[in-house]
């Protein structure tokens, strides 16, 4: 330094000038970046619609109950648990989330731009730990939305201005897109999903190919698998003293896998031979149609028509459901080929004898006086004295 003080002086001067230029450029650029990218945590509001839900804050006093009609602001990290008798509604920004009975969800990230000039989208990240939700996203006035729902099987990215139904079970997750668009990510695969489509993710598997949004609520309705896969078989003798049971078995009739109901030797005593499947699934609000479809055949019936009270047909379908007022109701459809006694057939439809007949109900959402809210079960059965009937490809289709 003593040998060449001029060089040191110039080095110091140039370094100071470079630092000055860096500060002059970096401060406004950094400030601009911060204004455009800074985010702030936001709160959501959870409301109990039915029953009592449990809210678990990330820190604080621990879980607390929230009764019907009450609401509470929640933050990131909050877990909402809805039992089998409750429902909840969550609102954040201009988006909504409806939680059906038996649902648990965690709010992982909930943020928006700190400043009006911010460019980052609103951020909503949720973990659906089990159950079913309806997600409604809306277009923001200033920003888009980074909306993601994670499940054990994968991730769902939701577009703004959409309507989606998601369901998470231990072994699989499902999404149905009614409006908007989604990206489904699992096992390193990204699959786009358009409006009117749905898909399923199994554990450690990529998304299944997209299908139509219509959903069959019945398992093994084709009867290609053993009856134990989804169905429970039993007989109900009623109260008239009969003791001759019918039987139900899987057969192949004219190349069609089917369930066959047979009873002989009833001697005028009542019996019901039943296949029952428990469904216990709420109907998502976006659906506009609910129909029963099946192929049916009646080979023989000893009791004419539907019996004395239009309740004993050689082949019947019964849907048990809860309506929007939480009352348990049922829908019944019977099939017969003869009514020599002129019995009531209020709940029956005459079909050709010993021929496969394709049946499709009307839209039950329009036909029933009070809209169904939750499907409890379906029963396919034969009722009366002696009978021999078959059913194949029975479906309860919601779309």
Image: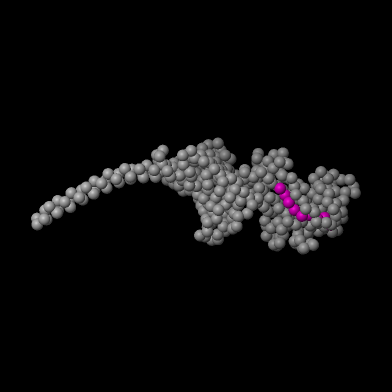
Magenta stretch, residue numbers = 291-299
Residue found at the far top of this picture: 69
Q: Is residue 79 left or right of residue 231?
A: left
Q: Residue at x 83, y 49 (%)?
A: 350
Per the picture, the main secondary structure of the magenta-coloured stretch is: strand
Residue 155, position in %: x, y? 51, 53
Quadrant in which the N terminus is drawn? bottom left
Q: How many marks?
A: 0
Residue 174, position in %: x, y? 58, 53
Residue 41, position in %: x, y? 42, 43
Q: Is residue 162 left or right of residue 73?
A: right
Q: Residue at x 58, y 40 (%)?
A: 50
Q: Is residue 263 above or below residue 196?
A: below
Colouring method of the image: one colour
On whether residue 379 falls in the magenta region, the answer is no
Residue 353, position in %: x, y? 85, 55
Question: Residue 119's quadrant in the figure?
Answer: top left
- Residue 119 in view, yes or no: yes
């Amino acid at each position: 330094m003593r040998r060449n003080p001029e060089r040191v002086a110039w080095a110091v001067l140039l370094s100071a000038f470079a630092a000055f230029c860096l500060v002059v450029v970096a401060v406004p650029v950094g400030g601009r970046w911060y204004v455009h990218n800074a985010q702030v945590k936001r709160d959501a509001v959870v409301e109990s619609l039915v029953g009592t839900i449990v809210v678990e804050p990330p820190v604080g006093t621990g879980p607390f109950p929230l009764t019907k009609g009450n609401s509470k602001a929640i933050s990131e990290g909050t877990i909402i648990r809805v039992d089998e008798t409750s429902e909840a509604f969550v609102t954040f920004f201009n988006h909504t989330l409806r939680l059906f009975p038996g649902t648990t969800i965690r709010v992982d990230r909930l943020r928006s731009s700190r400043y009006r000039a911010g460019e980052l989208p609103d951020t909503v990240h949720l973990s659906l730990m089990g159950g079913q939700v309806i997600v409604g996203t809306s277009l923001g006035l200033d920003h888009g939305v980074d909306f993601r729902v994670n499940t054990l099987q994968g991730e769902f990215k939701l577009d703004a201005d959409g309507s989606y139904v998601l369901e998470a079970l231990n072994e699989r997750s499902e999404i149905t897109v009614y409006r908007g668009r989604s990206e489904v990510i699992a096992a390193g695969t990204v699959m786009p999903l358009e409006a009117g489509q749905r898909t399923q993710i199994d554990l450690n598997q990529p998304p299944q190919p997209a299908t139509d949004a219509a959903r069959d609520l019945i398992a093994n309705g084709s009867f290609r698998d053993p009856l134990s896969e989804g169905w429970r078989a039993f007989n109900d003798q009623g109260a008239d003293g009969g003791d001759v049971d019918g039987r139900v078995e899987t057969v192949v009739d004219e190349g069609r896998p089917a369930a066959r109901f047979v009873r002989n030797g009833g001697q005028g005593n009542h019996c019901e031979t039943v296949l029952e499947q428990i469904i216990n699934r709420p109907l998502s609000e976006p659906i506009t149609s609910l129909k029963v479809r099946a192929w049916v055949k009646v080979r023989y019936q000893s009791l004419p028509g539907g019996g004395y009270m239009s309740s004993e047909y050689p082949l019947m379908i019964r849907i048990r459901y809860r309506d929007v007022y939480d009352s348990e109701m049922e829908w019944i459809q019977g099939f017969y080929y003869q009514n020599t006694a002129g019995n009531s057939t209020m709940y029956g439809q005459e079909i050709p004898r010993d021929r496969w007949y394709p049946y499709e109900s009307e839209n039950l959402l329009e036909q029933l006086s009070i809209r169904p809210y939750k499907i409890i079960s379906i029963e396919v059965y034969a009722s009366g004295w002696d009978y021999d009937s078959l059913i194949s490809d029975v479906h309860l289709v919601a779309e």
